[in-house]
């Protein structure tokens, strides 16, 4: 009887441990020393436990540089497990592409294992996170995953990096591109020069749409142009599969169709409600993207607001 009780307790304990674990996702090699762990598409949920972004890492001569280790302590731990399969080198730098918590709350796990790593982000990311965005995002993740991210602490980056900064780590150069007012006003893109890889954060999305509530359409279109001019050949979007320059142009096209159509139709006196079906008809190539149906109305409204503001400039 005692044995069964012990067995039962162990079973419960292991189930409780499992509840906090994000299952392994493979690290896909995209260049000589750079890898992406492509997260599943969609919004944070109890099923994905909040993991739905694209963590990226580069193994340099003596170190590992990590970008966006995900949305929680548990996603960060999963990322650490994948890195460990490839190298025992220490993580020395962790970059956050922007303030949205699905990209950086995983910093907690990295800090636990590599307390000396440097955490870097755009100055505006750091100030917004400290001014309340960190707590807001911890709560958003808890609510959307029904508690699967519980125990996560916000490890806010401390070192600010802005446009044109170059971070040299051993044999690799990480060039920072920070076009103003793109996806969130807190964005950096990272050009991993030797591997010709550009990590865009949510300035570029592929096959999946997301919230653009903090975005500028014109700024995001400009960010696509900056990405295309970087010299990179491989582009890692914030969400969705890695692609080439054509993938960047495709997303730029999505933004341009919505913004330009909204401006034109606004001049014709249409409300955003009336515009929506006309704009949706022009976006056939995107109808299959994850979350198209639940985001397009919002995106059109945001484009109208921005076009209205622009007409007063
Ligand atoms: Zn975002």
Image (cartoon, helix red, strand yellow):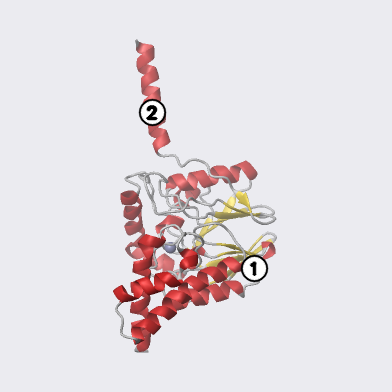
Give how far across and how far down residue 233 sits, in percent: 65, 66
184 with respect to 91 (left or right): left
What residue lies at 39% left-to-right and 13% top-to-bottom?
3
Specify the label residue 145 is tagged with.
none
Residue nearest the viewer, comparing 62 with 30: 30
Please tell me whether mark 1 sits on a helix, a strand or a loop.
Answer: loop
What residue lies at 70% left-to-right and 60% top-to-bottom?
171
Which callout, 1 or 2, points at the residue further toward the start of the chain? 2
- Rendered-image quadrant of the C terminus: bottom left
User: Can you tell which quarter of the image residue 292 is in?
Assistant: bottom left
**Residue 164 visible to the viewer:** no
From the viewer's perspective, is the residue at label 1 or at label 2 nearer?
1
Name of the residue lying farthest toward the top: 1
Specify the label residue 232 is tagged with.
1
Local packing at callout 1 (Cα closer than 10 Å; few below 14, some 14-19, many 20+) is some
Find disc 2 in the rendering and name its residue. Answer: 13
90 relative to 296, above or below:
above
- Rendered-image quadrant of the N terminus: top left
Quarter of the displayed picture in which ligand 1 can be seen: bottom left
**Residue 219 visible to the viewer:** yes
Local packing at callout 2 (Cα closer than 10 Å; few below 14, some 14-19, many 20+) is few
The yes-or-no answer for disc 1 within 8 Å of ligand 1 is no
- Pointer 1 with pointer 2, Cβ within 8 A: no
61 relative to 295, above or below:
above
Q: Compute the Cα span from label 1 to label 2.
A: 47 Å
Give how far across and how far down residue 170 sits, in percent: 68, 59
What residue lies at 37% left-to-right and 20% top-to-bottom?
8
163 relative to 11, above or below:
below
Give how far across and how far down residue 93 sits, in percent: 56, 57
């Amino acid at each position: 009887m005692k044995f069964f009780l012990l067995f039962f307790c162990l079973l419960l304990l292991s189930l409780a441990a499992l509840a906090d674990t994000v299952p392994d996702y493979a690290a896909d090699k995209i260049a000589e020393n750079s890898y992406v762990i492509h997260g599943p598409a969609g919004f944070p949920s109890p099923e994905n436990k909040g993991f739905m972004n694209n963590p990226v890492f580069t193994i340099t001569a003596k170190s590992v540089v990590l970008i966006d280790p995900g949305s929680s302590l548990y996603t960060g731990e999963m990322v650490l497990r994948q890195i460990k399969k490839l190298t025992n080198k220490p993580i020395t730098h962790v970059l956050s592409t922007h303030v949205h918590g699905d990209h950086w709350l995983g910093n907690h796990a990295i800090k636990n294992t590599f307390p000396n790593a440097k955490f870097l982000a755009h100055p505006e990311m750091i100030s917004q996170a400290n001014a309340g965005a960190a707590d807001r995002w911890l709560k958003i993740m808890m609510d959307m995953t029904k508690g699967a991210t519980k125990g996560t602490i916000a490890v806010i980056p401390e070192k600010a990096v802005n446009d044109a900064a170059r971070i040299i780590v051993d044999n690799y150069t990480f060039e920072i591109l920070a076009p103003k007012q793109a996806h969130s006003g807190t964005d950096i893109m990272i050009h991993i020069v030797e591997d010709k890889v550009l990590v865009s954060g949510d300035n570029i999305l592929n096959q999946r749409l997301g919230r653009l509530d903090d975005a500028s359409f014109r700024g995001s279109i400009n960010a696509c142009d900056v990405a295309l001019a970087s010299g990179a050949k491989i582009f890692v979007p914030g969400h969705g599969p890695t692609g080439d320059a054509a993938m960047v142009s495709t997303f730029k096209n999505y933004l341009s169709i919505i913004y330009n159509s909204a401006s034109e139709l606004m001049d014709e006196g249409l409300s955003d409600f009336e515009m929506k079906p006309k704009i949706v008809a022009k976006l056939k190539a995107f109808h299959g993207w994850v979350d198209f149906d639940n985001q397009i109305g919002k995106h059109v409204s945001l484009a109208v607001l921005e076009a209205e503001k622009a007409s007063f400039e």
